[in-house]
Amino acid sequence: MAYPSGNGGAMVVGIVELAIKQWTCNTGARTTENTHSGTGGYTNYEMVVWDARWTADGPWDDTAIPDTVAVGLIPGSKVTVKLQVGSGAKFIQLTNTIIEDFELTNDNTSDIVRWRASGKGGVVIRPT
């Protein structure tokens, strides 16, 4: 077994690499209820489409401001996002994913300004 370290993972938006604290990606599915007489009185669900959702957060970088046109984390815009798995070559890529939210946090306790972005949808390439 090989358990990759989470250190070194980054997020690439288009061609811009952003340092991050962490990212999460849910590659779930939308389902529809399809119960019928052949299901023995139990509910039955069928997959309709893949439904990816993701969130990433990191430190504010004055030279690559995340919510600018140059980087692309602008709510309502569609981008390609690559979430690197640790320091290795594996990644999850979401093509044509929409940016849903962008949030800034001024953290006096940790003496840093942080950002958090989330999005959903898009074509998913999973790590292999």
Image (cartoon, helix red, strand yellow):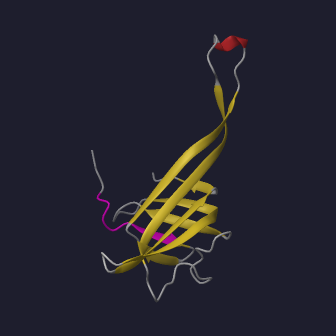
Q: Is residue 32 magenta?
A: no
* Boundaries of the magenta span: 5-12
Q: Is residue 64 above or below residue 90?
A: below
- The structure residue drawn at horizontal position 64% and vertical position 57%, both measured from the top left corner, is 122
- Picture coordinates of residue 13, whole percent (x, y): 54, 72
Q: Quick check: 85 left or right of 102?
A: left
Q: Is residue 11 magenta?
A: yes
- The structure residue drawn at horizontal position 30% and vertical position 55%, both measured from the top left corner, is 4
- Picture coordinates of residue 33, whole percent (x, y): 69, 28
- Picture coordinates of residue 69, whole percent (x, y): 62, 82
- Picture coordinates of residue 42, whole percent (x, y): 61, 16
Q: Quick check: 2 left or right of 97?
A: left
- The structure residue drawn at horizontal position 30% and vertical position 65%, both measured from the top left corner, is 7
Q: Residue furthest front?
A: 108
- The structure residue drawn at horizontal position 62% and vertical position 64%, both measured from the top left corner, is 100
What is the quadrant of residue 43 in the picture? top right
Please tell me which residue lies in front, 12 or 67.
67
User: Magenta: predominant secondary structure element?
Assistant: loop
Which quarter of the figure is the N terminus placed in?
Answer: top left
Q: Residue furthest bottom?
A: 63
What is the quadrant of residue 87 in the picture? bottom left
Please tell me which residue lies in front, 102 or 86.
102
Please tell me which residue lies in front, 119 or 95.
119
